[in-house]
Amino acid sequence: MPETSWGYDVVRDEFDSWVLAETDDWICIDKPPMVVCHPSKHGPTSSLVGAIRLYRGLEASHLVFRIDRETSGVVLAAKNRETASRLQRAVGGRMVHKDYIAILIGELSEKVMVNVPLGRDLDSEIVAKQGFRPDDGREAETTFEPLMTGGGFSLVRVGMRTGRQHQIRAHAAHLGYPLVGDKIYGVPADIFLSFIEGGWSDRHQEVLEHRRQALHARRVIFNLSDERLVFEAPLARDLVEFCRRRMGIDDPAGLAG
């Protein structure tokens, strides 16, 4: 993808290679890291939604769910409002199961569930940061299952019963095993603030070790009344390389399957 001053420009050939499955009603994309989901002021090719509209000749496209800019993996978009409403109702009705793969700092020894209410972290100067809010937070439940550990890191499968903002990242940090490359959770606030102000630096490389949060949307399953839809995206190449280089895992993609 061509890199610009504001992000990445989604070109047609690359976009077509991201398509996992497609019908007249929806399109499923294996989103690379650093691609923004929602439209921006920089034109249609500056976002996934804009690229879908442009390259599929649609008046509109509707994200059924979204993932963060740095997160890679499965994203589903509807091509019409009726399909969007149907699939979004399934998400709201908890008829959807999502599996993520993450790399955590520290070696997690056993499967663990985190049930910690989340809300805006009022003690942080980072507006988007979520924190533990026992009295007025929203219910949030996440499971972390280690697949392999090594080199001081853990490759884990992550499941969620709820879908709150930054839920996996906040719960991983609360557990004491923050995500590799996370600029907000498990590190001083100035890591994120200095990145926003001046971009990636030697200090970020020293503290974070990876240029983006090590989180991948691996599998999404819709259990609808009339059909079952299963979408899978292979583990992103940069995470495969991290596992091989830092953890000594020969086949991380196979483990993540």
Image: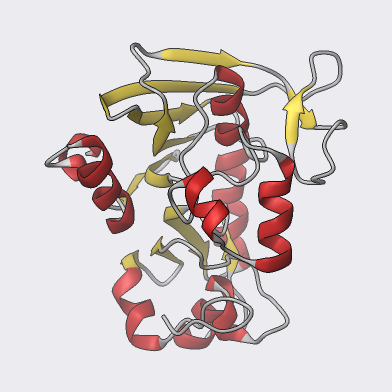
Image position of 217 (left or right of 233)? right
Q: Position of residue 227 (x, y in %)?
A: 36, 44
Vertical comparison of 15 with 143: above or below? below
Give the colouring mode of the picture. Answer: secondary structure
Percent from the top left, x then y, of residue 239? 32, 49
Q: Quadrant of residue 13?
A: bottom left
Q: Give the vertical position of 131 relative to 225 (above or below).
A: above
| Residue in the picture at 55% in, 53% down | 204
Q: Is residue 93 visible?
A: no
**What is the quadrant of the N terminus in the image?**
bottom left
Where, quadrant-wise, is the C terminus in this rendering? top left
Give left or right: position of 250 versus 233.
Answer: left
Q: Residue furthest left?
A: 250
Where 81 sits versus 243, above or below? below
Whether 109 is drawn above or below 185: the answer is: above
In the rendered image, residue 215, in percent from the top left (x then y), is placed at 44, 44
Q: Position of residue 40 (x, y in %)?
A: 69, 76
Res 220 → quadrant: top left
Q: Residue at x 54, y 27 (%)?
A: 172
Residue in the foreground of this view, choosing between 207 and 14: 207
Q: Report the side of 111 relative to 148 (left or right).
A: right
Q: Is residue 4 visible?
A: yes
Residue at (25% x, 52% y) in the render? 241
In the foreground, 193 or 102: 193
Q: State the residue at coordinates (36%, 21%).
A: 107
Observer-nearest of 251 and 217: 251
